[in-house]
DNA sequence: TTTT
DNA sequence: TTTT
């Protein structure tokens, strides 16, 4: 179990890139407000989000800076080598599912909100008919 | 671990009542859309939500039919006796935290959304200062 | 967003049945302890769980009464007609993912625990290689 | 909403420290297995966990390297200055609730598992009596 | 017996 | 720089 659920707004437009093998990735920071101790302390954590494949394309086509979304995903830690040869760690949330909540949504316009779930990451997408239940 | 996270809209205005000992409760159904198998099957589950005390009052004062909210809570099963003496079960989500997401919010108007957390149910409310961290 | 995460133990062996079209379902009650107000009040909620298809078969083959598991799923409300013609509602958790945590696990024996995710319900199953990341 | 739920094992014993003002902190890495694409790829993410106050002390007293736990918390990003003056970011999960799942638990021995929730971070701790419900 |  |  490695589950993350975040609600926030894109701190900038998503960047869509492609791997050598042609997979799409979208990455952006999500500004998630901290609600501190009753006070009016209104800071945010800027959490790096990465989406892959179909979900990445949906991000690129539908989200802009300021979009309010819910992200379901998992925490993943990558490591890479510094220019100085030092090992560095990057913590990201790999998105499995994104729901569009608020306004500031680009190029999409249904009043009912939307829910997107990426190719390989897709889940819960089948709804089983009540009539078929054998009990 | 008994954790529920729902995003939906109030199917009707919340009903606020008081126990004999004076505790407030708010109850309402939350319409949570099912996103079925890629199709446009747009049904919803109408999930009974119960809030207590301070959180109940916040619901009564801020939510109306149609308000879009996120509910964090837990599943609880109550039982009671039928008029016919039969044991019946009621499944409800006891709200621990509610975030106001969308429009259709009564009597509140800040552009940043809001997060409410009830008296006895309150959690995560203390934010520890970074400067004090001893590592 | 309709997300449930539960940790508990099977109150009885799972019952596996098949729909007319041949889909497997497993159903069982999960006993989830309530940890009340610091006291030693040790009641549990018995929450009905339903799994479908491949996940249902994994449940039937691996779980027994007493097995400790984590269930990730969603709340679903079904309705049916009473013998008396009255409309009744049943609330169930449709499992999307199950992790085997503790002991009392039937017919499986790897010391590392296990994670199962059902056919149509499968998700998050692809892990993208770090080397391929284009940033 | 900034919610994380992790199940894993402590990669080492927790380190308990105190701030200048006397607050306890416990920190450790949690090894959370990745279950990749059906294959037997058995890597893990080593996720830094921080607990505060009462919850920190419970960690120090009850957990050891190898303990299997469930952590509920939130993602938090701290920044500090390098020795070279460069701004560095640290991503941690601030624990709000910890449940002891498996074996390898130090100094505690009840067969039912345990659930701990820290002082300022405590939540969901009140269970409201069914009898009092006014509906 | 319901939301958008 | 790690758990089982």
Image (tube, coloured by chain):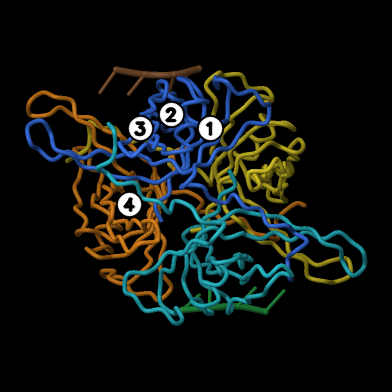
Chain colours: A yellow, B blue, C orange, D cyan, E brown, F green
Circle 4 is placed at which residue position?
C54
Mark 1 Cα shell of 10 Å, populated few (<14), some (14-19), many (≥20): some
Foreground: disc 1 or disc 2: 2
**Alpha carbon separation for disc pair 3 and 1:** 37 Å
Task: Tell me the quadrant of the picture where the C terminus of chain A can be found.
Answer: top left
Q: Name the secondary structure under disc 2.
A: strand
Q: Is residue B19 above or below residue D49?
A: above
Which residue position holds label 1? A115
Total numbered badges shown on the rendered structure: 4
**Residue C102 spot, x, y in % from top left:** 35, 69
Chain containing mark 2: B
Depth check: give the residue in front, D6 or C96: D6
Q: Secondary structure at mark 3?
A: strand
Q: Which residue is disc 2 drawn over?
A: B33
Mark 3 vs mark 1: same chain? no
Mark 1 on the same chain as mark 2: no
Within-10-Å neighbours for mark 4: few <14, some 14–19, many 20+: many
Which of pointers 3 and 1 indicates the residue nearer the eye?
3
In-image side of C25 versus B135 (left or right):
left
State the image quarter where residue C77 is shown.
top left
Residue at the spot of label 3: B18
Q: Residue furthest right?
A: D84
């Amino acid at each position: 179990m490695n589950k993350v659920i975040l609600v926030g707004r894109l701190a900038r437009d998503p960047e869509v890139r492609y791997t050598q093998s042609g997979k799409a990735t979208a990455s952006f920071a999500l500004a998630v407000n901290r609600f501190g101790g009753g006070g009016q302390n209104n800071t945010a954590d800027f959490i790096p989000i990465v989406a892959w494949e179909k979900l990445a394309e949906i991000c690129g086509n539908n989200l802009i800076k300021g979009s309010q979304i819910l992200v379901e995903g998992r925490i993943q830690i990558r490591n890479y080598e510094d220019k100085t040869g030092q090992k560095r760690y990057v913590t990201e949330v790999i998105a499995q599912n994104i729901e569009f909540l608020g306004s500031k949504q680009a190029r999409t316009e249904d009043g009912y909100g939307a829910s997107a779930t990426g190719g390989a990451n897709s889940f819960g997408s089948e709804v089983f008919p009540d009539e078929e239940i054998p009990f």
